Image: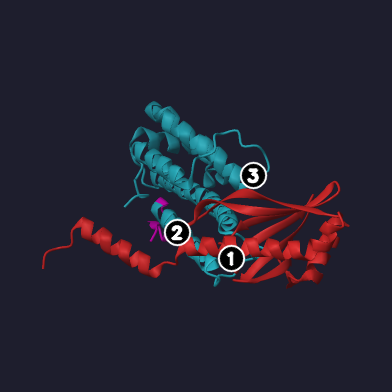
Amino acid sequence: MSPESLKELLQRLAKKRGESEPDWTERKNAWLKSLDELYSRLEGWLTESKEAGVVTTDRDWVSITEEYLGTYNAPTFRISLGARSVLFRPVGTLIVGAYGRVDVSAGSRRCLLIRSSANSWSVATHEKGAITGDLSDVTFAAILRDLLA
Amino acid sequence: MGTKFGTVRYPTLDDVWQHHLHCEQAIRTWQRAIQGGTGSHSWPPFLSHAELDERIEIVLDEVGEQTILALMASAEAELLTDYWRRVAKRRKDPLSKSIRKSRKHKKRSEAARPRLKEDILSHWERVHPGSKKVVQDFRSLLKVRNWLAHGRWWVLRAPEPKSALDVKFRLESILRSLPGLRPTATP
């Protein structure tokens, strides 16, 4: 049996790598989709306030660089209440112990949204990362109260 | 492991470096375990991999500083054991003679505890003027060693070494360049 050539070796390693590694493109797409769904949920909870002219919302983009995923644009979400605003800024999907993280900030006040599974988000404190509850209209209101009070 | 002086075994530069590599390897393994969700750590949860990398780099930098201190200690041991060999074996070379002569005027307590700069490096410079540059480099590293050993609370005036590996290479070169020094630091 003839020895494996360099080309054959690299082809074999590339094939093996492809079999054992996650589909990073799929991971990124799922992450971006989950962000879109998250912001839609937040907008849904804000519908009445928006219609009453109390708040406005807008989306923008932030550039994120992650290992395996490279550099890509992810959407941010901003809720404005007069001169004050709350920014939802995605950090990435490669997070220790979670599937994604969004940092929520208003000035120096912060908290975290943790994507604990494909479609589930939890609220956590910024300082210690302690989970305080699942994201719901109630915890969302608590976030706004804590950050804007 | 180590080299001997009398009955005492002490670590060589290579021993210190091996330990450094083991530490680095362990930290990288720990980093992968954290990323995989199985490694415990004292940082806040839900760090991004980039944030974790930054923290790991700080840990590795700290290990590097500790290694520099250990490398310096090993090199100091080489110079001190060389000093005592020259005293005990009554060699006839100019450096050994100069060292023994200087001890005659010392009090017993001073002679028992030779000082690295005054009793060893100065002799090297005086007896072997060609070693001056090498000794100067060692003196520069001694400033780093003192800065590390005494808590880094002042601004280091000497240029900070690029890495622990840089210090290892410099110390190996220094020990190799000093004439008549037994090169026990490298196998």
Taking A72 as reference, is A20 above or below it?
below
Q: Say what amino acid the circle numbered 2 marks.
A: His
Taking A23 as reference, is A91 above or below it?
above
Looking at the picture, do discs 3 and 1 lie on one chain? no
User: In this structure image, what is the colour of chain A?
Assistant: red
Q: What number is the disc on residue B152?
A: 3
Question: Is B168 left or right of A47, judged from the image as shown?
Answer: left
Question: What residue is rendered at 66% in x and 66% in y?
Answer: A114
Q: Which residues are magenta?
A: B1-13
User: What is the secondary structure assignment of the residue under circle 2?
Assistant: helix
Question: Is B155 left or right of B131, judged from the image as shown?
Answer: right
Name the residue furthest front: A51
Residue A64: % across, % down: 57, 51
Q: Are marks 1 and 2 in contact (CB under 8 Å)?
A: no
Looking at the image, is mark 1 or mark 2 nearer the viewer? 1
Q: Say what amino acid the circle numbered 1 marks.
A: Val
Pointer 1: what residue? A96
In the rendered image, the quadrant that contains the C terminus of chain A is bottom right
Q: How many marks?
A: 3
Residue B10 makes an appearance in the image: no
User: What is the secondary structure assignment of the residue under circle 1?
Assistant: loop
Pointer 2: what residue? B19
Residue A14 makes an appearance in the image: yes
User: What is the secondary structure assignment of the residue under circle 3?
Assistant: loop
Residue B22: % across, % down: 44, 61
| Crowd class of label 3 (few under 14; some 14 to 19; many from 20; radius 10 Å) | few
Question: What residue is rendered at 68% in x and 69% in y?
Answer: A121
Towards the viewer: B150 or B169: B169
Residue A38: % across, % down: 67, 64
Towards the viewer: A66 or A36: A36
Q: Are marks 2 and 3 in contact (CB under 8 Å)?
A: no
